[in-house]
Image: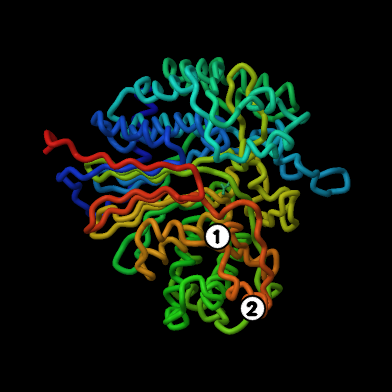
Amino acid sequence: MLLRQISLISCLILASLNLNATAKTQQLTAAVASPDQYGAQVAAEILRQGGNAVDAAVATAFTLAVTYPEAGNLGGGGFLTLWFNGKAYFLDYRETAPARAHRDMYLNAEGEVIENLSLIGHQASGVPGTVMGMWQLHQLFGSKSWPELLAPAIQLAEQGFIVPDKAYLYEGDMLQRFAGKTNFVAYFGKMQPGERFVQAELAATLKRLAAEGPSDFYQGKTAELIVAEMQRGGGLISMADLAAYQAVWRTPLVTRWRDRQLITAPPPSSGGIALQQLLTLKELNQQHFQDVAHNSAQYVHLMAEIAKRVFADRADYLGDPAFTEVPSQKLLAPDYLARRAQEINPKAISATETIKPGLESEQTTHFSIVDHAGNAVSNTYTLNLDYGSGVVVSGAGFLLNNEMDDFSAKPGVPNAFGVVGSDANAIAPGKRMLSSMTPTIVLKDNQPELVIGTPGGSTIFTSIFQVINNLYDFNMTAEQAVAAPRFHHQLLPKDQIRMESVQALAEPVQAELTARGYSLHTPNWDLGDIQLILLNQDGTQAVSDPRGRGATRLIAASPSQP
Ligand code: GLY
């Protein structure tokens, strides 16, 4: 254990970035914005009891694994951006492809993608990273004991939580999606809005994790249950895969934006590079945005022109840096972005055929936390789509991810879900699949000003981009910035603007976009579930997206604290 801790610390020295900040000594109002009330309540309690942002994050992640089963998880993975004692860190606990995975594993004899194989059932899962991620985070930055941080989740699993109204499950489509294909219905079919839902197997798993740490999950009884589940359904994850899993401390992507610094996700997420490109391309086209109204047809068009270029780069160049050379510096180089900025046509739609393609998937979850000392956690984690593969580890009571679908099932060809990618994101044993998760912290004068993130697959970074514009360019309040209608364009489908059903763009804007040659698409799900904390001259504000069932808490500094 000590050896592991020492090697982690040496990785961290490489992975952290000292931005010459002095840690704040003055006690701030702490805050949490969580995708549900249980996560918010648990984080607030930990902060109230003197825990730091990392303690609160670990406890919240395990809580959401109980109360937010569509995306909170033990069987998935994620990314976490951290600002701690004046330094920036990034933790990659993304899933990996099992050793028996191979490039063509989702293709039939004719070389065509087999429908749903990478999405539903045992073969859809990558090796989970969440438990190792939370452990490594806790070992290096936590101030409370590991069992203390798992206690709230154990209690909620053992005694149950009240199932909320806002969830896709209750519309029946999730039950239909997995019925007859996985054991999902046997575990989650009884969830009823307004009723208490108890998860006894999950409580037992969490108790083992509390007592034994990650060795239970990666080598012990839980590992055996995962592998037994895999064997029941032809899945690939082995004991060796679990034992080999490592979370990775990476150097965060830190860039200057106006008079601020943006700390965000490096590869294997595409999100940080994409967000930087979006912000810079907009900055370089400032003259075209002059006097352009928020969410007007011209605004939507300009944003789509920018997003097109970003998604083209994403499809061609991005993947796991351990397997593919990601030209991060070139993609963010001022001369490159200046050239790309000039390609943007303010008057008409650039022909899709002249720009290389890219697109991706949807459900995930995010929470943001700031503690009294100004340390900040921005964490996005996921099972990929809602309820992941639909496979519950029998005897352990948790869902496994369907993250393998984030690879390109067949490079250059859209897979069953419509993903387009290249060799950079082809399947290989041990490789991390490309992500769009973009947990981000904006610094002003070397202190966190904005902690932000959202689920939404490929709409993650375009959603964050729009909220940043709403805040900094349209001077909206934090609530307005998060609530404002969002839209999305990602190069393919050609000339398509995705809108939200409830918060659709205004009708005259829709008519003008159609007249310009765009087609409008309104899926029955919203664009993201932003969880945001803003720290400015008005103090600490926390906002949960009204699109979701999130909750916020502000925790005033206790008068006894210095
Ligand atoms: N599974 C969604 C993402 O990582 O982008």
Type of the residue with mark 1: Gln
Of the two numbered discs 2 and 1 on the same chain, state the one appearing first in sequence.
2
Q: Which residue is mark 2?
A: 350
Residue 279, placed above or below residue 79: below
Residue 62 seen by the camera? yes
Residue drawn at x 28%, y 48% is: 87
Instruction: Please indicate whether residue 218 sits to the left or right of residue 257 in the image.
Output: right
Q: Report x, y in % for residue 325.
A: 56, 55
Determine the image quadrant of residue 188. Answer: top right
Residue 373, placed above or below residue 488: above
Residue 345, placed above or below residue 408: below
Residue drawn at x 28%, y 35% is: 52
Type of the residue with mark 2: Ser
Residue 263, placed above or below residue 1: below
Q: Residue furthest front?
A: 194
Q: Nearer the viewer, mark 2 or mark 1?
A: 1
Q: Report x, y in % for residue 207.
A: 46, 16
Question: How far is disc 2 from disc 1 in space, using C-alphas?
Answer: 27 Å
Residue 95 seen by the camera? no
Q: Say what secondary structure mark 2 lies in.
A: loop
Q: Say what secondary structure mark 1 lies in.
A: loop
Which of 307/524 is in front?
524
Residue drawn at x 43%, y 61% is: 467
Q: Report x, y in % for residue 386.
A: 61, 40
Which of 232/508 is in front?
508
Q: Report x, y in % for residue 230.
A: 69, 25
Q: Which residue is mark 1?
A: 503
Q: How many C-alpha atoms fall within 10 Å of the one at disc 1: few (<14), some, or many (≥20)?
A: some
